[in-house]
Image: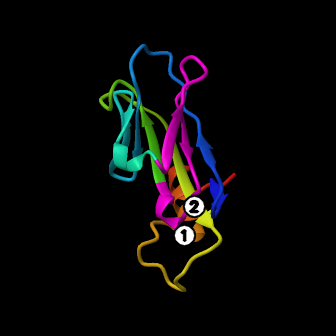
Amino acid sequence: MVAQFGETVHLNCTTTQEVYIDWHHNSDVIYVNGIIDDSLRSKYSIDTSTDGEYTLVIHNVTVAEGGEYKCIDNAGQGPELVTYILAVKGKNKHKRCSACPLSIQNIMLILSMRLGGYLI
């Protein structure tokens, strides 16, 4: 998934289980046991307006929010329900960004590897 710098991004996750899900960004936990950490509330929110859906909303996305997002069932102990790879296009203060987690080329390589070398 590619987002433009400054956009609001919605990542959907649906479960039929009667437990909370967890949202992870790379190796960091964003949402666990129905709670977003206070330090992340200005950047992330969860939309649970539809039964069984836990939509992660990323506000005013920047390159720092690029990377892998996972929705995991059963309080982080169950199976992955969905994985997103997010790349952010647009404003970048640095010509080379060593802190930027993924480039478009790296995302295409990851997707190709996950699909057995085939891109759709």
Which residue is the extreme one toward the right? 120
Please give the residue where the numbered disc 2 appears in the rendered image. Answer: 87
Nearer to the camera, 72 or 6: 6
Q: Amino acid at mark 2?
A: Ala
Q: Amino acid at mark 1?
A: Ser
Where residue 12 appears, x then y in whole percent? Answer: 58, 35
Q: Residues within 10 Å of mark 2 (few under 14, many from 20)?
A: many
Q: Is residue 86 magenta?
A: no
Per the model, the C-alpha gap separating discs 1 and 2 is: 7 Å
Q: Are marks 1 and 2 in contact (CB under 8 Å)?
A: yes
Q: Residue at x 56, y 50 (%)?
A: 115
Picture quadrant where residue 95 is located: bottom right
Q: Residue at x 64, y 67 (%)?
A: 89
Indicate whether 70 appears above or below 20. Answer: below
Which residue is the extreme one toward the bottom? 95
Indicate whether 108 appears above or below 70. Answer: below
Residue 116 appears in the picture as rendered: no
Identify the secondary structure beneath mark 2: strand
Circle on res. 103: 1
Residue 73 appears in the picture as rendered: yes
Nearer to the camera, 52 or 77: 52
Q: Range of the magenta residues?
A: 42-67
Where residue 99 appears, x then y in whole percent? Answer: 41, 73
Q: What colouring style does the render use? A: rainbow
Q: Residue at x 57, y 50 (%)?
A: 59
Q: Residue at x 56, y 42 (%)?
A: 57
Where residue 20 appears, x then y in whole percent? Answer: 39, 23
